[in-house]
């Protein structure tokens, strides 16, 4: 159920109301309510059905506490309550049934918390304080908040070009330097390294979302994502390699929608195969960063992906980032690469193996572990470019004026390429 209390504004509603079945629970609740600065008279005798009857003819409060003790079918009654609650209501349920499945179902239905009787003062105080914080938090339905959200997908043209390293570094920069609430979604379900780069356990959040897309909501996101710092949370997986991915992609779309409601920045580490299988993942993406390397294979696949983006995600701004660049050590020159893809490379990140090893040893992202490093400086420039990408008209995907080299295609490059003096490093 998509409960209507998940978003909305307060208007002139009461800050709190409760419908509790027994006097013992009311005796514990009333002093806490007074302590919170609310009216104890708003703590009424009666359970969930009384709440439905009362709120059907009166405005619902900002925070509502309802007792399920006399309810024979709590989930069905919660649905009835959602029908009469105004948008923005934060609901706390109390009851006597100590059942994990009921607890999970209630949270999935949109309830903020479920408290087990007998109630304690500390338990009530903590839950009400959290509910007040949830209600007071900025709602992403506000026009200004919605405008601020930027969604960026990082795609590697080949395996091993450093797309995941770039994704984690950018996510960290947005969360730490720019102080933006940031979600990092690692869609390499079996071999993702997002959590590893942040020195975290991936958890089961992403696999649970894929298995149960209908249960994805704000509360699911809050519990499933792993917190890396105050502004950065990651959703990833380390699925068994004998378990193939079985999904129509609806879970990913729902996740992106919830991220827009809860964060200001979404970073998607998007493997090439996921781009092909689930093109709708880019429906609301603002920027697509293509991480590439100066090889023939990467030039070929950059051309193919840019063409795909023009057809399937023309609204997104593409940025070409050449990673692991070594002067004089590339298969093809920058000029030949740019002539082949018919546009400029936006950013070139120098290859620095010592910095990469340092980040791995520290269990930090590349940008965090190497703050003053030249390569990290380029990553910061990319972050700044993405920040302005949602407001500027991107002209970087327009073909460059062709030079003589522009007449060469990849076959020509292969033909003109000199025989290497030593064995070349595989592109993959």
Image (tube, grey):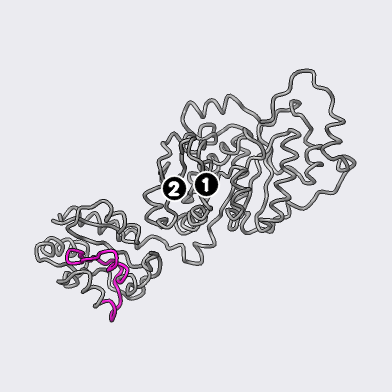
* Farthest-out residue, top: 422
Which quadrant holds residue 88? bottom left
Compared with 198, 213 (above or below) is below
Name the residue beneath numbered marker 2: 231
Q: Does the magenta-highlighted stretch encompass residue 66?
A: yes
Answer yes or no: do the residues labelled 2 and 1 have beta carbons within 8 Å? yes
For disc 1, the neighbor class at 10 Å (few under 14, some 14 to 19, many from 20) is many
Instruction: Depth check: give the residue in front, 30 or 5.
Output: 5
Is 154 on the left or on the right of 398, as rendered?
A: left
Q: Residue at x 48, y 57 (%)?
A: 254
Instruction: Depth check: give the residue in front, 105 or 183.
Output: 105
Name the residue beneath numbered marker 1: 174
Q: Residue at x 40, y 43 (%)?
A: 204
Which quadrant holds residue 147? bottom right
Residue 177 visible to an observer of this rendering? yes
Q: Secondary structure at mark 1?
A: helix
* Farthest-out residue, bottom: 57
Q: Does the magenta-highlighted stretch encompass residue 136?
A: no
Which quadrant holds residue 79? bottom left
Q: Secondary structure at mark 2?
A: loop
Query: Percent x, y for residue 336?
Result: 81, 37
Quadrant occupied by the C terminus: top right
Q: Along the polypeptide, which appears first: circle 2 or circle 1?
A: 1
Quadrant occupied by the N terminus: bottom left
Q: Which residues are magenta?
A: 55-80
Query: Percent x, y for residue 189?
Result: 50, 41
Residue 233 visible to an observer of this rendering? no
For disc 2, the neighbor class at 10 Å (few under 14, some 14 to 19, many from 20) is many
Query: Percent x, y for residue 199?
Result: 44, 34
């Amino acid at each position: 159920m998509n409960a209507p209390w998940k978003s909305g504004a307060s208007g002139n509603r009461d800050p709190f109301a409760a419908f509790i079945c027994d006097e013992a629970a009311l005796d514990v609740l009333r002093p806490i309510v007074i302590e919170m600065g609310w009216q104890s008279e708003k703590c009424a005798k009666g359970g969930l059905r009384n709440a439905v009857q009362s709120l059907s003819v009166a405005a619902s409060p900002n925070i509502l506490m309802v007792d399920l003790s006399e309810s024979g079918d709590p989930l069905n009654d919660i649905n009835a309550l959602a029908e009469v609650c105004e948008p923005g209501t934060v609901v706390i349920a109390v009851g006597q049934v100590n059942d994990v499945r009921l607890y999970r179902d209630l949270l999935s239905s949109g309830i903020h918390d479920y408290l087990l009787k007998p109630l304690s003062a500390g338990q009530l105080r903590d839950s009400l304080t959290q509910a007040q914080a949830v209600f007071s938090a900025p709602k992403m339905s506000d026009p200004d908040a919605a405008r601020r959200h930027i969604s960026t997908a990082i795609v590697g043209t080949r395996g091993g070009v450093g797309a995941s390293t770039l994704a984690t570094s950018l996510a960290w920069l947005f969360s730490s330097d720019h102080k933006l609430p940031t979600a990092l979604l690692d869609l390499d379900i079996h071999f993702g390294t997002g959590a590893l780069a942040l020195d975290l356990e991936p958890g089961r959040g992403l696999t649970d979302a894929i298995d149960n897309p209908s249960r994805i909501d704000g509360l699911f996101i809050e519990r499933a994502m792993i917190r890396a710092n105050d502004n950065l949370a990651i959703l990833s997986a380390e699925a068994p390699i004998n378990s193939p991915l079985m999904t129509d992609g609806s879970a990913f779309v729902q996740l992106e929608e919830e991220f827009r409601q809860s964060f200001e920045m979404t970073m998607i580490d998007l493997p090439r195969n996921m781009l092909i299988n689930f093109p709708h993942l880019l429906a609301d993406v603002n920027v697509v960063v293509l991480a590439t390397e100066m090889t023939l294979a990467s030039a070929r696949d950059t051309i193919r992906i840019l063409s795909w983006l023009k057809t399937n995600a023309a609204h997104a701004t593409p940025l070409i980032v050449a990673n692991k660049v070594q002067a004089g050590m590339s298969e093809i020159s920058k000029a030949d690469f740019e002539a082949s893809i018919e546009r400029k490379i936006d950013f070139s990140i120098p290859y620095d193996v010592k910095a990469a090893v340092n980040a791995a040893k520290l269990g930090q992202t590349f940008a965090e572990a190497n703050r003053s490093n030249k390569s990290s400086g380029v990553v910061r420039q990319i972050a700044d470019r993405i920040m302005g990408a949602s407001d500027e008209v991107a002209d970087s995907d327009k073909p460059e004026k062709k030079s003589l080299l522009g007449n060469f295609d990849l076959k020509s490059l292969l033909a003109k390429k000199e025989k290497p003096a030593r064995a070349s490093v595989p592109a993959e």
